[in-house]
Amino acid sequence: MFLGKRIKELREEKGLVQRQLAAELEIDTPMYSKIERGERRAKREQVYKLAELLKTESKELLTLWLAGQVYELVKDEEFAINAILEVKKAL
């Protein structure tokens, strides 16, 4: 969701097609497409590789990747915001 939207923006800005990035990541194009649509999570190693391929800071993509993981974990929880605020205090 978070990461997928951003890598799609970057890919389109660079004039690349999904199959090019999929080949570099050594995955098939449908799997890459699912990552962009937020239907599948990228692996941490893939995020680093995407940052390199898309010529962007890995920090930005890793932040979005991690935000997506947190979101998926708490999105249906009644007290999600409270829990996140507690984590924020601890960090």
Image (cartoon, rainbow, N blue to C red):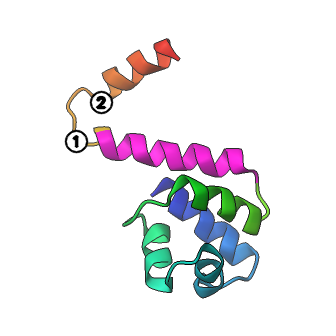
Residue 15 occupies quadrant: bottom right
As for residue 59 lying within the magenta part, the answer is: yes
Residue 13 placement, left or right of 77:
right
Q: Is residue 54 visible?
A: no
**Residue visible at 40% across and 40% down in the picture:** 70
Q: Which residues lie in the magenta part?
A: 57-73
Residue 83 occupies quadrant: top left
Quarter of the picture holding the N terminus? bottom left
**Residue visible at 60% across and 73% down in the picture:** 25
- Residue 72 image point, x, y percent: 33, 47
Q: Contact, CB < 8 Å: mark 1 with mark 2?
A: yes
**Residue type, label 1:** Asp
Question: Residue 80: which numbered mark, if any?
Answer: 2
- Residue 65 image point, x, y percent: 52, 50
Circle 2 SS class: helix
Residue 54 occupies quadrant: bottom right
Question: Residue 76: which numbered mark, if any?
Answer: 1
> Cα distance, mark 1 to mark 2?
8 Å
**Residue type, label 2:** Ala
In the rendered image of this protein, does residue 29 appear above or below residue 44? below
| Magenta span main SS | helix
Q: Tell me if mark 1 has few (under 14), some (14-19) or many (20+) residues whose alpha carbon lies within 10 angstroms of its own.
A: few
In the rendered image of this protein, does residue 14 appear above or below residue 68? below
As for residue 51 lying within the magenta part, the answer is: no
Q: Is residue 56 visible?
A: yes
